[in-house]
Amino acid sequence: MGLTFVIAVEFMKGNAEGKYSITANALAPAGMTRMVGTIPGMEGRPVPPEMNPELNGPIVAFLASDRAAHVNGQVFGRRGYAYTLFQTPKPLAALYKEGGMSAEEIARNFDAAFTEHLSVPGIPQTAAMKQAQAAAAAKK
């Protein structure tokens, strides 16, 4: 994500000067292919339709189009049939010492500074995604 943000800012400067007409965005795609069937325990399982990697294509096509010229420096994802927009990362906590720290000093102070702010890996579902899934399930 960091590279996407840096490129977006650099092109934004050039765009303002009339040098470029370029945007930079990132996609965290989702998908499963037949190759998943080579994973032990996954043999013979069909790929669920919502995990079809071709579902990533439409948002890529949109972001590459002139209609998305105003979209720059964003990170999008796909989860099932939903396209998602990730929040730009921002600092939650800091561990600081003038002149820097050794690995041992970081280890001694890490938990007090960061542990309460750590998150569980994965993509949490937003309320909007849950509502969309419930509405789709109700139509079935």
Image (cartoon, helix red, strand yellow):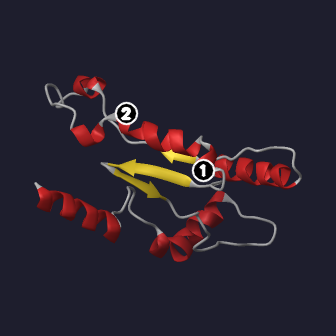
Measuring from the top left, give residue 76's x and y in whole percent. 50, 52
Circle 2 sits in a helix, a strand or a loop, which is it? Answer: helix
Measuring from the top left, give residue 79's x and y in whole percent. 35, 50
Instruction: Identify the residue shown where x is 56% and y is 68%.
Output: 110
The residue tagged 1 is: 68
Horizontal arrangement in the rendering, residue 115 relative to residue 125 (left or right): right
Measuring from the top left, give residue 62's x and y in whole percent. 53, 44
Classify mark 1: residues with Cα within 10 Å, few (<14), some (14-19) or many (20+).
few
Q: Is residue 4 above or below residue 52?
A: below
Q: Is residue 95 above or below residue 51?
A: below
Closer mark to the observer between disc 1 and disc 2: 1
The residue tagged 2 is: 54
Q: Are marks 1 and 2 in contact (CB under 8 Å)?
A: no
Instruction: Identify the residue shown where x is 19% and y is 64%.
Output: 134
Q: Is residue 109 above or below residue 51?
A: below
The residue most toward the left is 140
Front one among 96 and 25: 25
**Total tally of numbered discs in the picture:** 2
Instruction: Identify the residue shown where x is 22% and y is 25%.
Output: 37
Instruction: Identify the residue shown where x is 46% and y is 67%.
Output: 118
Horizontal arrangement in the rendering, residue 88 relative to residue 9 (left or right): left
Q: Is residue 4 above or below residue 115?
A: above
Disc sitting over residue 93 in the figure = none
Amino acid type, residue under disc 1 in the picture:
Ala
* N-term-proximal mark, 1 vs 2: 2
Front one among 103 and 85: 85
